[in-house]
Image (cartoon, helix red, strand yellow):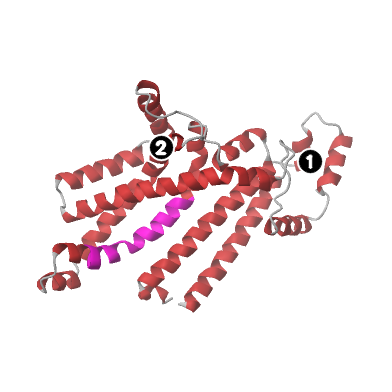
Amino acid sequence: MFLFILKRLVLAICVALTVSAISFGLLYMAGDPAVAIAGENASQQDVDAITARYGFDRPLLVQYGAWLGGALSGDLGRSWYFDLPVADLVSDRLGVTMLLGVLAISFALLLAIPMGVAAAMRPNSLIDRAALFISVVGQAIPSFWFGLILIVVFSINLGLVPASGSTTWKHFILPTVVLGYYATPAIMRLTRAGMLEVLSADYIRTARAKGLSGRKVLFKHALRNAIIPVISLAAVQMGFMLGGSIVVESIFALHGAGFLAWESIGRNDLPVMQALILIFSLFYILFTFFADVLNAWMDPRLRVG
């Protein structure tokens, strides 16, 4: 198990370094960053002054090393728009996004796993078809359109929950449903497929032949093995949710890191975008790493290779 964790840790560090290089390269993808800060109508003297201030005239590797060293110590640079430390801007917003992500993945798991299990227990039944319908609809509906429909129905017409803001727990209800529903179809289908495969296995038939109760066979023997790939998928979905929060937080004016990313794109605030891409990617790598370790702990066969 130790060797497995060590290999996964080395792989995660390599991926993180690759992501950091890509995030740093974002600074130069739009051209000269000094011109981007100064504006198209700025004089050459202003551009030269900004180049000297931010050190854009240094070799790229030196700039990357300085930026990476600063990021590792918590210094993510200064926002071009706000002229404030990026770390302070992100830390003020990240808690909202993380809370939304945890609520959304919890909503998705609580909805998808029971429906996936029920569909597998009764193939081709009404429950199975309802699960398939939810899965297809969930994939077909764009999240921004689904969010607008919920706002019209539950905020404007019924007045049950607020449509925007992030000051109370009620502000998180609709964003949680929209973001969580995005992950539900994939988790439900994987749970159903895993349960169908496990329920037809020999050891399940043996457990039933020994006289074990249906509940014990389902929860102790079948669900534990069927849930292993779902854990990996949930970790991946959690990573996607952090990225998907950009759209959802923008729709509901939820002042999290996703909304900050949306604002930064509009303001061409590249240091903030760099930091958010790096942080979202690191969370994605971290979730995947812990999912791999948890899967290997639950199924020792995965530790081989």
Residue at horizontal 38%, vertical 49%?
Answer: 106
Residue 105: x and y in percent read 40, 49
Badge count: 2
- Could you tell me how far apart the alpha carbons at marks 2 and 1 are, in whole angstroms? 42 Å
Specify the segment rendered in magenta: 219-239
The image quadrant of residue 38 is top right
Residue at horizontal 63%, vertical 33%?
Answer: 266
Q: Which residue is mark 1?
A: 34
Three-letter amino acid code at the position of disc 2: Ile
Residue at horizontal 21%, vertical 60%?
Answer: 196
Residue at horizontal 29%, vertical 65%?
Answer: 224
Residue 29 can be seen in this image: no
Q: Secondary structure at mark 2?
A: helix
The image quadrant of residue 150 is top left
Residue 303: x and y in percent read 42, 75
Residue 234: x and y in percent read 40, 55
Q: Residue furthest right?
A: 45
Is residue 229 highlighted in magenta?
Answer: yes
Residue 173: image tag: 2
